[in-house]
Image (cartoon, coloured by chain):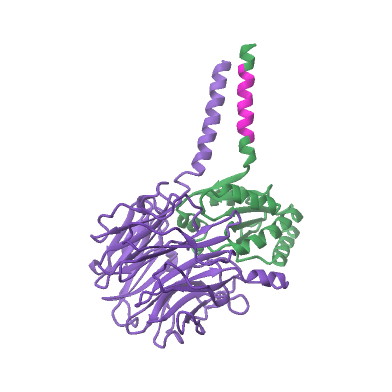
Amino acid sequence: MKRRLVGLLGLGILIASASALGAAPALKLFERGTWQSVLRGHAGRPTLVHFWGVTCGPCKVELPLLGQFAKDHPGIDVVTISADLVPNLPAATQSMLDKAGLSSTENFIFNDGFVERLRFEIDPGWQGDIPRTVLISRDGTISTIEGSAEMADLEKWSAEQLSTH
Amino acid sequence: MIRNGLLGILALAFLQGAALGQMHGQHASEAACDEPTLRCATKVTPAFGPDGTLWLIWMAGGQVSVASSQDAGHSFSPPVQVTTKRLNLDWGPDARPKIVVDRKGGIALAFSIFRDEAFNGQVLYTRSADGGKSFAELKPITANNESQRFEALALDQDGTVFAAWLDKRNRVPAKEAGRKYEGAGLFFASSRDGGATYAEAGLARDNTCECCRLGLTFAAPGRPAVIFRNIFDGGVRDHAIMTFTDVSTPGEIRHVSNDDWQIDACPHHGPSLTVAPNGIYHVAWYTNGKTRKGLFYAHSRDEGRTFSAPMALGRPDRSPTRPFVLAGPAGTALVWKEFDGEKTSVQMTISRDDGETWSAPKTISSTTDTSDHPWLVSNGRQTYLSWMTKADGYRLTAIEDQP
């Protein structure tokens, strides 16, 4: 009986621990090598990768539009990457993603203070301006939209990707 | 068995906790540590006092501190903390605390904080009248409560302190009138009492890019000059320069370079300006425009009305960033950062003929982890590179000593 109680207690700790993690969910850590894993993980699928940050004014405007785009296009993998390096950021990042309707997409946050190296791995020509949207087609062709994306352009790209399926 | 299982579960819970802790740990941070000390600083700004004392202001551990050095950065006085509590400092890539030291040894400071959870900024300022032993209570530089960031300070010969910053107050009436408001306003204020109080803020230019540092200096007595990323027609975020008629009267906007960078984004990458004693303006900036991409330098011999053809800086395959230009006693020096995939280096070139020709760039410092922007500072006899690095701490390197 006592042993069972101990076991239940342990299970309770595990559940509490897991739910604590679940409460600040799914923000994945973007570190050295993560970019290649993202590319591998979505290979063969049309994927939209959006770089943004909580302190970026144009990002605040674009993020909800992207949330709607993700909802309307389940055939497109949407990945967001918070590229800000303000400390204590995960809560603010998650909150903005939730409000924008992006809770269930694959969401990353930069987790390496050596941000030049992270950016260099993604695109040596990228100096950190955000927002920035990278469109990866089924065949791996990458095109980059610097600044806020026009939703009409995303619609067009999406239609092309889905029509070639 | 069950106990072992419980231990395993507890261990798992601790490991998960540790993993979350690491998420906020130093690997993820730009700082080497989380204390208010210089070693933990992410942004360090230097200034020489009239007696040759080097003053540093830095942000570390959520605090802003000041210290001085009598031996060119080899040793420092015990730091004086300017902030009395841990603040949500503006940690943006182009933000940093500012310092000017006047002829009487008065020290004026300014820096930005995020004052709410929506990352609205506020520019705070303070002053020391006792040679940096103590600082007055922090005050907002303007009574207006809309977002302000990216302050800059410059000191005139007569001790007037001039401040400029980016301010979003004018988006409020625009929004009420149903109009879209792009960017932020370039605002300014001056202080006749060494930075103890500032005059009411004035508008120099509406609709400038809201997320890049400013370059600010005095072009001549009573005439501040500021370079900033403007928003030109069509959303083109190219650089503009303005020389004030006096500290209360903004001048005309001049286009520094027609780069044609049309982008609705935060470049987080502002320009640099210095005006030599002979009145020549030297500017350096980053663009990713249709006309040109990368880091560039140009000079003006007519008070910023026209500029020389932009000269590209750095190796395009090494992501050149964060240019800084300073007209010093031995010439005009330019520094910037380059990244080779593993290391960040500071490159330096110098011109001894007012920007007409430049020496071959050379590496004057490097580091294997994250680093602050390279900054140049002069004591009137020598120009130094001031550079904070996470791996190697703070460095002050005499430019002229470089072979």
The answer to whether residue B380 is left or right of residue B299 is: left
Q: Which residues are magenta?
A: A6-19
Give the residue drawn at x 65%, y 58%.
Answer: A137
Q: Quadrant of the N terminus of chain B?
A: top right
Front residue of A129 and B195: B195
Residue sitting farthest toward the top: A1
Q: Quadrant of the C terminus of chain B?
A: bottom left
Provide residue B131's location: percent of width, then percent of height: 31, 62
Query: What is the quadrant of residue B155 in the picture?
Result: bottom left
Residue sitting farthest toward the bottom: B302
Provide residue B90's location: percent of width, then percent of height: 50, 58
Chain (purple): B
Provide residue A72's location: percent of width, then percent of height: 76, 56
Front residue of B279 and A42: B279
Q: Is residue A82 visible?
A: yes
Query: What is the quadrant of residue B364 in the picture?
Result: bottom left
Give the residue drawn at x 69%, y 69%.
Answer: B175
Q: Colour of chain A?
A: green
Does the magenta portion include B308? no
Q: Is residue B293 visible?
A: no
The answer to whether residue A72 is left or right of residue B111 is: right
Q: Is residue B337 above or below residue B59?
A: below
**Principal secondary structure, stretch drawn in magenta:** helix
The answer to whether residue B35 is left or right of residue B171 is: left
Q: Is residue B345 above or below residue A24?
A: below
Provide residue A75's location: percent of width, then percent of height: 73, 53
Does the magenta portion include A13? yes
